[in-house]
């Protein structure tokens, strides 16, 4: 499924106490992508302001991989960048399907470079004087071979990213 709204006005209602909302009636860029992978539908969302430097109002992932088809998460969100970290602080655990690893996602911000990591079931927050980001990771896990269950994806990422202005 592709959401193609070229030339069509779409009303997006955001209701949250942590998001910086665009002004009512403001124009935003909405990029929503899906990809069916086996029994799972991967989904990515990026809503950018057309003002405020095109800042990311809301970025979201619920997918078996970080990168959407045809692009990267860095290109979709523009900033910040999230990748699977080079080092994983948590040891794998075992369940009925085999071993799985809770992942640390490395965070990088264009103007400032590497900015730390956010863990599975974790939060990350940074205030860079004029702006900042908040990231909530509900899930970032990877199955380690051999996987004893056929109905599970090898990895799963579920997260939200918001931008905010600061003083």
Image: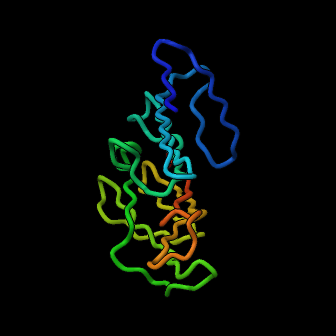
Residue 112 or 45: which is nearer the viewer?
45
| Residue 164 showing in the rendered view | no
Q: Tell me what residue is drawn at x 42 percent, y 48 percent.
A: 130
Count of marks, rendered view: 0
Return the residue found at the far top. Answer: 7
| 136 vs 117: above or below | above
Residue at x 53% of width, y 56% of height:
134
Q: Position of residue 3 (x, y in %)?
A: 51, 28
Asked whether 99 or 60 is in front, the reply is: 99
Q: Which residue is found at the position 43% from the left and 39% from the top?
A: 55
Q: Is residue 119 above or below residue 113?
A: below
x, y (%) of residue 167? 49, 49
Using the image, determine if residue 79 lies above or below residue 53.
below
Q: Is residue 160 above or below residue 143?
A: above
User: Colour scheme of this structure image?
Assistant: rainbow
Residue 146 at x, y percent in the picture:
46, 79
Q: Using the image as rendered, state which of residue 49 and residue 119 is in the foreground.
A: 119
Residue 79 lies left or right of residue 38; in this view the side is left
* Location of residue 68 in the rendering, given as x and y in whole percent from the top left corner: 41, 46
Who's the residue at 40% across and 70% down the image?
A: 116
Query: Residue 152 occupies which quadrant of the picture?
Result: bottom right
In this orientation, does residue 30 appear? yes
Q: Nearer the viewer, residue 156 or 46?
A: 156
User: From the viewer's perspective, is 88 left or right of 93?
Assistant: left
């Amino acid at each position: 499924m592709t959401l193609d709204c070229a030339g069509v006005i779409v009303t997006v209602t955001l209701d949250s106490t942590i998001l910086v909302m665009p002004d009512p009636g403001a124009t935003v860029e909405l990029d929503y992508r899906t990809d069916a992978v086996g029994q799972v539908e991967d989904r990515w969302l990026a809503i950018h302001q057309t003002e405020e430097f095109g800042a990311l109002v809301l970025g979201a992932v619920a997918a078996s991989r970080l990168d959407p088809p045809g692009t990267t998460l860095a290109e979709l969100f523009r900033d910040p960048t999230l990748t699977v970290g080079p080092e994983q602080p948590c040891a794998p655990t075992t369940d009925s399907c085999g071993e799985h690893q809770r992942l640390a996602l490395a965070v990088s911000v264009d103007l400032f470079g590497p900015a730390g990591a956010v863990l599975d079931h974790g939060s990350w927050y940074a205030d860079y004087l004029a702006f900042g980001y908040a990231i909530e990771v509900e899930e970032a896990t990877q199955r380690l071979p051999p996987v004893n269950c056929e109905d599970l994806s090898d990895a799963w990422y579920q997260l939200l990213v918001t931008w905010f202005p600061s003083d």
